[in-house]
Image: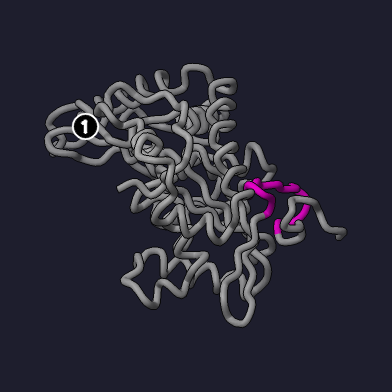
Amino acid sequence: MPLLLGMRAPRHAILTLTTTGSTGDLEQAVREGEQVVGAGQDVRAVLGDAWWNAMLDQSEELARAADVRCPGAVERLGALLQAWAVGFAAVRPDVLSPGLAASRRGLRADEAAGFLSALDARVLHVDSAGFVVPQAFRRKNSGGRYALFSRSGSGAAVNLEYLIQMAAAAELLMDHGVAGTDISFEQGEFDAVVEHGGVPVLAMEAKARIEGADGLLALLKSLLRPETNARTRANSNHRRKYAALLDMAVRGPVTLWLVADGARWAFQASVAAGTLQLTPRTAAGALHVNPHLPLSAQKPNGHLSRP
């Protein structure tokens, strides 16, 4: 059942190799009554209608901006993925076919434009078999070479979250002025962590989609309402992220940046009475970064505090 009911259907282009209906559960949700249920209902109840409506507007604006920034991004990245899948099959004996498996999540304009922008700026390098090596931010100690594909049946499937995670980390550098040496990709429980003087000031988590059981709203619900984790069998991954963010915030304010196709939600994380508190940095959680100041020196409303 869709979690993000009541959200306007996105205008994202969808890669043709996906199954029909991969435009997502949102369109079905709109047809089924414009009601907000599940994680979306809980998040809206906590953050309010103003944040919720601004989030919907932001999602549409990101899709429009992607079309302007990188026209035909879905088609271009789709062609590259098909070519890289051929190379992936050539280097993996257990992959018998270069064909890409159909995906219900598809490929959308915002995520495609973000990845291509990082590729064009040489922040990311992709070899002929679809293995990505970040060029401008810190990689994990285990090697820092990431596969865009995994084996699926006799062929390959796209690891969509890697596309979004790496594009989001590159966006911190290219669009928000964060030094690449301050960005650690895949650190601890988060997809990226920004440190200033060895102290974490931003934690980034990216999901393939806003909606769904493993979507951004489900994670945000767990972070906003930790009391539900004790009463229910909450996602263990969510519990670990809550604990990790709480540990960071004990040392000082931290920006939590949640990213998906059509979403850039920023919150200031702090601790009160031993509990994690998340405050939207603006009505829609927009991210404002000054490259010369640690993120913790910026006020939740996106304006800079005095040094």
Q: Give whichever of 133, 176 is nearer the camera.
A: 176
Secondary structure category for the residue under label 1? loop
Whether residue 274 is visible to the viewer of this picture, yes or no, is yes
Which residue was labeled with disc 1?
Answer: 101
* Residue at image coords 29%, 23%: 82
Determine the image quadrant of residue 22.
top left
Question: For the C terminus, which image quadrant?
Answer: bottom right
- In the picture shown, does residue 117 fall above or below 272? above
Q: Nearer the viewer, residue 23 or 142?
A: 23
Where's residue 145, x and y in %?
39, 45
Quick check: 182 above or below 57?
Answer: below
The picture places residue 288, in percent across and down from the top left corner, at 71, 47
Residue type beneath disc 1: Ala
Vertical side of 172 occupied by 237: above or below: below
Q: Position of residue 210 (x, y in %)?
A: 44, 45
* Residue 62 picture quarter: top right
The answer to if 165 sits in the magenta stretch is no
Residue under the point 65% across and 74% down: 251
Residue located farthest toward the right when viewing the structure as drawn: 306
Tell whether 268 sits left or right of 82.
right
* Magenta-tinted stretch: 281-295
